[in-house]
Image (tube, rainbow, N blue to C red):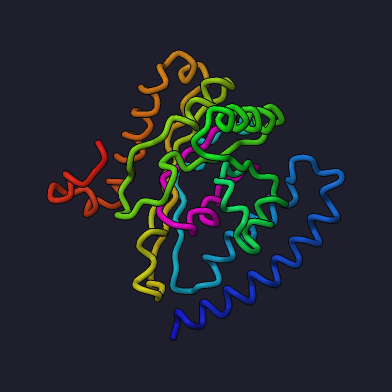
Amino acid sequence: MRSVLYYCVLLIFTLVYFLLFAVLFALTVPFDRERSVIHHASRLWGKAIFRMNPWWRMRVEGLDKIGRGKAYVVVVNHQSMLDIPLMYVLPFNFKWVSKREVYRWPIFGAVLWMHGDIAIERGTASAAKKMIHDCGERIGRGTSVIVFPEGTRSRDGRVHRFKEGAFLAAKTLGAPILPCVSEGTGSVMSGWKFRMPHAFTVRVLDPIPAEEVARTPLKEMTARVQATIASAHAQLRPDLYDESKEGEQDK
């Protein structure tokens, strides 16, 4: 019954908020190049999704590690679509780097477009160049970008192999990297039902300065950040990384 009630509340909230979001977009987009007003509205939307459920708890760690006024390439593990509203706990303006096909989704795709996020076509060199160019425009104006370097959601909850795109962008653009860990979104569902009570965690890890990104070989930086995020995630969910499942984990 709790899940049915939450689905109904979430649907009504999403539809109403989408209409308000569209009005806000029309009023602010002519003079708000970085869509900072829209981003603030997205933060309110993201927080509301979790706070409207009294059986859910959210914990955020490491916000003090974020440098004020810095634009990062943020990388975070990916467990479910709920990672997107969850990551709006980060206290700065950012743009998602998202697959082009996501823009075809009803409502959600329109919100990505209004938000000014970066769409990518996977699998081509020209798409990678355009992604780096688009990220560079945002970072050059002081706006961070956020990427799921696994490229898709984890099926077992663990951190899997990272693709190099986000790290190539950071290296090319001379940008620092901000590793983050998301936990709880992948285990919130039991069939079609939401788990209640349930807890979600976002942990911000130590940023990697632009100078260090620049002098470190691409493959080494990719593997290093993957290992760092996997280690931090294992601290939150040691049950996912026991020896019996070691053979399934990406090497």
Q: Is residue 67 left or right of residue 80?
A: right
The correct choice, above or below, for 119 with respect to 101 in the image is above
**Image-quadrant location for residue 187:** bottom left
x 46%, y 60%: residue = 58
Pick the quarter of the image with the N terminus: bottom left
Count the numbered circles shown: 0
Which residues lie in the magenta part? 72-94
x 56%, y 40%: residue = 121
Q: Is residue 21 left or right of residue 244?
A: right
Q: Residue furthest left?
A: 244
x 58%, y 78%: residue = 9
- Where's residue 38, x and y in %? 73, 52
Q: Which residue lies furthest to the top in this view?
A: 215
Which of the two residues, 207 or 31, is positioned nearer the viewer here?
Answer: 31
Q: In this view, does 125 lie to the left or right of 29?
A: left
Pick the quarter of the image with the C terminus: top left
x 74%, y 61%: residue = 21
